[in-house]
Image (cartoon, rainbow, N blue to C red):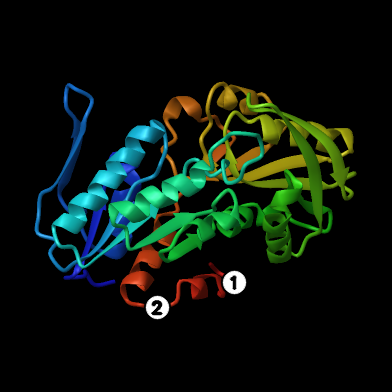
Amino acid sequence: MPPFDDLKVLSGNGHLELAKDICKYLGTSLASSEAFKFSNDNTFVRIKENIRGKDVFIVQSLSTPVNDNLMELLIMIDAAKRASAGRVTAVIPHYAYGRTDKKDQPRVAITARLVADFLSVAGADRVLTLDLHAGQIQGFFNIPVDELTAIPKLARHFESVAGSDFVVVATDVGDAKRARSTARLLNSPIAIIEKQRLGNNDQVEAATLIGSVKGKTALIVDDEVGTGGTILAAENALIAQGASEIFCAVTHPLLSGDASTLLKNSNILRMAVADSVPVSEERRWDRLEVLSIAPLLGEAINRIHRDQSVGAMFDSPST
């Protein structure tokens, strides 16, 4: 793939390694910039090369520390617009605050919408993201949003174990569409776990399993794993209903708190995740497999830059 004279890829500190891998796919180099904090905790950003009239893509995953990375992204967008960039696309592999997409309690914010407003006001012309927690978040934006999915890549990673006794499992009713798409891809049946979340402390209690998993190999699919409570509750429900083996495919490996230890000691044989957020060595274990999404994001950037269809990427069986 030839380099682009009018395309620039910038990166904040959210996931510099992923940004470099995207540039390798595109056959270009990462544009020079700097982002750091002053002693007064104020964030400073400077783009160190000319981007006037360029098609600028800013890669920033909203991983820990979420608020620092979000602020850094907003300032980078503003800096790019003030440097007369032709178009600015915020490439956000992991969109934080996605769980707060509705008012499910009195007097709470819809923070996913607030973040969308931040990005628009900062000057982003479009957003490229990956496996939003809820599809309706796209509707929070008044600018174009391209949402990719890593689930097909992760699911195909387990195709060697897929057979007539293979079933795709959604961790809740709201995730049934994702599970159904994955099941269709693997030509497998699905099961759905009806779960209950206990308050705001990340505790989850799985209630009812819809579908049959007895004697079958179960593949749990989800958009993210935080404390691991949802995955572990699903694991318990599947074991109770007689699943023979359990695999797991999750896009965003946040792995907060003791999640790594809990999942390492679980009955999940293998877990495949995308590198949408950095996964440090201390949070990895031997049955965790981290797959690169740089080619997926890189191809989407290429298509956006060339005004080609992004959706067509998923029409091919090999995608």
Is residue 94 visible to us here? Answer: no
Q: What element carries label 2?
A: loop
The crowd level at tag 1 (other Cα within 10 Å; few <14, some 14-19, many 20+) is few
Q: Considering the image in quadrants, where does the N terminus appear?
A: bottom left
Q: Which amino acid does label 1 sit on?
A: Pro
Q: Nearer the viewer, residue 129 or 214?
A: 129
Disc sitting over residue 229 in the figure: none
Choose between 31 and 62: the one closer to the eye. Answer: 62
Q: Is residue 274 left or right of residue 47?
A: right
Labelled pair 1, 2 in contact (Cβ < 8 Å):
no
* Residue named by callout 2: 308
Residue 104's spot in the image, x, y percent?
A: 66, 39
Residue 142 location, quadrant: bottom left
318 vs 186, left or right, is: left
Q: Mark 1 points at which residue?
A: 317
First in sequence, mark 1 or 2: give its number: 2
Q: Residue at x 26, y 52 (%)?
A: 77
Q: Is residue 193 left or right of residue 106?
A: right
Q: How far apart are marks 1 and 2 (CA)?
A: 19 Å
Q: Check disc 1 and report its element: helix, strand or loop.
A: loop
Q: How crowded is mark 2: few (under 14 residues within 10 Å), some or many (20 or more)?
A: few
* Image point (31%, 71%), residue name: 305
* Residue 150 against residue 269 in the figure, above or below: below
Q: Residue furthest front?
A: 107
Residue 309: percent from left, percent from top: 45, 76
Mark in the foreground, 1 or 2 = 2
Tell me if residue 319 comes above or below residue 136 in the rendering.
Answer: below
Amino acid type of disc 2?
Gln
Q: Position of residue 124 (x, y in %)?
A: 32, 58
